[in-house]
Amino acid sequence: MGQPDQVLGDDGLSFTRRDGLNWAELSVTAADQLDETGVRYPSTGLCLAATAVQNINALASDNLILWDTHQAEWGSDVFHRTTSDTYKITILTAGTYEMSASVAFDALSSSSARYNGIARFNLNGTTDFGPEGKGGYVRDTSGHTEASVHIQTFPKTFAAMDYIYLKVDRESNPTGTINTTPGASALYIRRIA
C-alpha cells in the first residue's frame, strides 16, 4: 500500500508533502491559503471593475482605464483607491504577482468609422511591460460596434511602492474615439510569492 501524497501536521498549519520520492516540509501562516494540492498561495488579491462609461480619446497613447469598483479584495499587499487616482494600483509588499486584464469597447463616440485599441500595463509611469492585448478593432458599419482586448494572466515581480496602471493605446491610423462598455472591463492582481 502506498503512502499518502500529503499529511497535515498536528498544528493544522504544516504539511509534509511527497514530491516524487522525496518528502518536503511545508509551513504556512494563518493568513495564507492552500489549494487542493497543498500549494501555498499568499492571500492578497484585488479584482477591479470599471462600471462607468469612459471615453477613450483620440490620443495615440496613454489613455488610462479608471477603476471605480472593487469586485473582490483581500489582504494588504496592494493598494487602490476608488475616489482619486483610480487608474493607479500601488504594490505595498515586494514580491511576485500574477495579473490579467480585459477592456471592452462599445460604440464609437466620434464620426470616425474605425478604431483599433491596444491594452498595455505600465510600471511607475515609465515602462510598458508584459503581454499586450491587441485586436480591439471596431468598424462602425453594418452593426460592428463592439470589441474587447484581453491580457492573459502572467507573473511579474515588483518592488515595494512600485505602481502600475492599465492603459489603452490606439494604432496611429485610424484616429477615432471610443467608449468602454460599462461594467465589462476588469483587472485582476494577486501576490503569488
Image (tube, grey):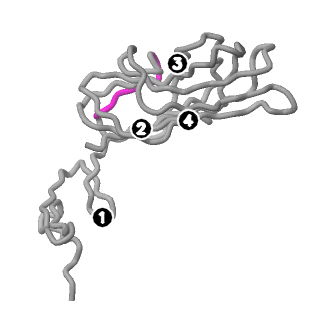
What residue type is disc 2 on? Met
Residue 115, picture quadrant: top right
What residue do we see at 14% from left, 68% from top? 22
Marker disc for residue 64: 3
What residue do we see at 84% from left, 33% from top? 143
Marker disc for residue 37: 1
- Return the residue nearer the eye: 34 or 102: 102
Magenta extent = 77-84
Dot 2, how many residues are within 10 Å of its Cα: few (below 14), some (14-19), or many (20+)?
many
Q: Is tag 3's residue or tag 2's residue first in the polypeptide sequence? A: 3
- Picture coordinates of residue 172, whole percent (x, y): 64, 14
Give the residue pinned by disc 4: 102
* Residue 183 visible, this orientation: no
Q: Is tag 1's residue or tag 3's residue first in the polypeptide sequence? A: 1
Q: Quadrant of the N terminus?
A: bottom left
What residue type is disc 1 on? Thr
Marker disc for residue 99: 2
- Return the residue nearer the eye: 103 or 50: 103
Q: CA distance from mark 2 to mark 4?
A: 11 Å
| Residues under numbered marks 1 and 3 in contact, where contact means CB atoms less than 8 Å apart | no
Q: CA distance from mark 3 to mark 4?
A: 13 Å
What residue type is disc 4 on? Ser
